[in-house]
Amino acid sequence: FVPSLSSDGRTFAVGSAVLNGENKEYHLYVQVYRYKDEGNMGDWTQMGENIHDKKGNHLIAYTVSLSADGNVLVIGDPGGFKGGINSGHSHVLRNVNDVW
């Protein structure tokens, strides 16, 4: 998983995987964080919820790319089935008030 950083360096997206101990399957998801200045101390805060494949059978989070301003996110899904088995596709999401 390779993270993506916005042009100003204040927003980054990263794909992650967590192994489910019960059925030994990986659950993949994307998280997006933005650096927010508040007084003298800034902090990285997550923008919205984890973004994941609701069906659980795709490779969402394999690749991510942010727009220059960090408000548009493209997620590659090489295991997607929309064009046939493992044909892959992309998800394009826009951030509106920290909701993707």
Image (cartoon, rainbow, N blue to C red):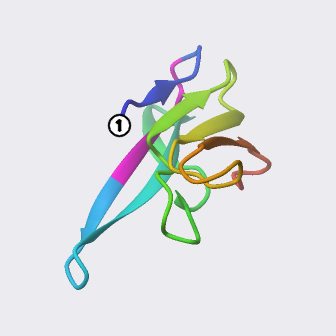
Residue 34 quadrant: top right
Count the marks: 1
Q: Is residue 4 left or right of residue 73?
A: left
Residue 19 percent across, percent down from the top left: 24, 67
Judging by the rendered image, the residue that carries numbered circle 1 is 1
Element type where label 1 sits in the image: loop
> Which residue occupies 60% across, 44% down?
87
Across and down, in percent, residue 39 comes to 52, 35
Q: Specify whether residue 38 is in view.
A: no
Over which residues does the magenta segment extend?
9-16
- In this orientation, which residue lies closer to the viewer: 38 or 46? 46
| Camera-side residue of 58 and 18 | 58
Residue found at x 48% / y 27%: 4
- Of residues 31 and 76, the one nearer the viewer is 76
Residue 10 belongs to magenta span = yes
**Which is more toward the observer, 80 or 75?**
80
Magenta stretch, main secondary structure class: strand
Question: Residue 23, how many percent across, how many down?
Answer: 25, 81
Residue 21 in view here: yes
Q: Quadrant of the N terminus?
A: top left
Whether 53 is among the magenta residues is: no
Image point 53% across, 49% down: which residue? 86
| Identity, as a three-letter code, of the amino acid under mark 1 | Phe
Residue farthest to the top, as pictured: 7
